[in-house]
Amino acid sequence: MSKSFSDKEMLSIVLIIITIITSGGALYYVSNVSTRVKSVSEDLEGVSDSLQSVSESILALSDTTVEIADKVGAPSPELAALAERLAALEEAMEAARVEPKEYIVFGRSLAFTGKYAKPALMAHKGWELWMKLVNEKGGIYVKDYGKKLLVKSIYYDDESDPATAAELYRKLIEVDKVDFLVGPYASAVNYAVQSIAESYGYMLPITEGTSTSLYKRGMKYSFMCGPGGVATYYSYPFMEWLSTLPAEDQPTKVAILAEDSAFPISVYEGVIAQSAEFGFEVVYQELYPKGTTDYVPMVTAAKDAGADLLVCGTYFPDAAAIVRAAKEVDFNPKAILCTVGPTLPEWGPELGADGDWIYSSSDWDPGAPTYGNEEMIARFREEYDTEPDYHTARDYACGQILEAAIMAQGTLDNDELLDHILQTSFDTVIGQLSLGDVGELEHITWPPGYVIVQWQDGAVEVVIPSVVATADPAYPTPAWGERP
């Protein structure tokens, strides 16, 4: 493997040769090794063509120095200094004998299959788009390497399973030896991965995990790479807005459904707290097991309890199933909000007209004049022929943050970058993000934190808050049999 040497390195080598030549007293008495020294010097003249040759030559010089010392008894000060310099240079050359670095390598698992596949794919596309645009610019300049490095990622399918993800992240570190990790999809999966990253001293930017539990574990290397706060607040703008309506228009009785896993539980806890804060009565609440397929019994129970507001902590499959169950049993609350599901572009095509009127929560506003937002949306449409969502924006923003941090610090050292990230504010497609201390989550986004979206006439619209709204909320929701 050939290597180019800097002027400083070449000067050091020349000085070594001069020192050898000018160590006259020793060399005078050991003329039998002068030929060897000359040979070594000739080897060193070709140093720029062969790093291996340099290393072998240095070893030869070291051996020569020992022989000289043996011949003359006690070495001269000059010879002793030469030996020390040779030893140091040999050590430096050994450390330098590595493959030239061309890429910054990221590693992650994602739910390419399983329950979380739909939102995980949107996140994946956001990350892939960020990498593509970075490489189109020639990569990221890293001062430690004195050049731009391209970016690439190693991916594995964790099948939406936390235990599988944990093993895959261990593999990414031990076998693939990636430079950086990026968190998987879903809070429950991130929970399993956090301790792996922590034990190896790898940063774990979590783009797709907002459960409160993730950030109360005292994990030094984990941080939320996104805005708004934890999942407890997903429904907050919606519940607050409902409380501002005229009394006769407000719902009064709330039903809460959520999967019994990390992220939905945080949503569930938030709705309970917000109901109390804004004066709504919780008349039915249910945490259902992961893998539930029949939602008719619990939707029927919510209807029988007299609920006129249904709020659900869901992913795409259960959100769609709950809406279908509501239609099946003719449950007609004034509003239905489901988390992950209605924000995805597949919602409309998959549910058709039944998907209209449904609210959801997002922490990204496609119309916001944020850093790189317009370019991201245009290129995403060009690359994938569909619309991005907040999962897309989160992962793209994470790339922006890591890119800015690497350029600012000029290193690929995880600890140095983590310190910088937690003390710096970053401009991203989501807004200006200040990640603060791990677990503190003092996030800033443009302008309100979470926004509420609603499907109207087959398209998703931002409806709350009014300052960023693309449409007014369509409220109250008409009965199933009265919809246009």
Image: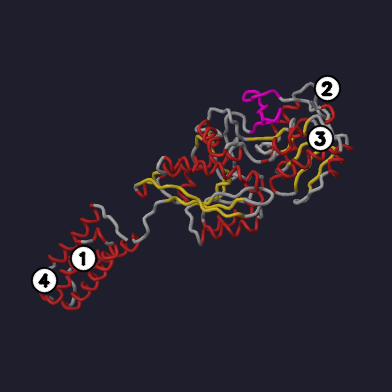
- Which residue is disc 1 drawn over? 43
Q: In this image, 60 relative to 119: left or right?
A: left
Mark 2, residue position: 248
Residue 456 lies, in percent from the top left, at: 71, 28
The answer to whether residue 268 is above or below residue 467 is: below
Q: Amino acid at mark 3?
A: Val
Residues at badges 4 and 2 in contact (C-beta under 8 Å)?
A: no
Judging from the image, what secondary structure is the residue with disc 4 in?
helix
The Cα atoms of the two marked residues, 1 and 2, are separated by 92 Å
Whichever of labels 1 and 2 marks the residue nearer the N terminus, that label is 1
Q: Which mark is residue 25?
A: 4
Q: Earlier in the sequence, mark 3 or mark 4?
A: 4
Label 4 Cα neighbours within 10 Å, binned few <14 / some 14-19 / many ≥20: few
Span shown in magenta: 450-472
Q: How is the image coloured?
A: secondary structure
Q: Residues within 10 Å of mark 2 (few under 14, many from 20)?
A: few
Q: Quadrant of the C terminus?
A: top right
Callout in the foreground (3, 4): 3
Tag 3 residue: 254
- Quadrant holding the N terminus: bottom left
Q: Where in the figure is residue 193, as x and y percent of width and height?
A: 60, 54
Q: Earlier in the sequence, mark 4 or mark 2?
A: 4
Q: Earlier in the sequence, mark 4 or mark 1?
A: 4
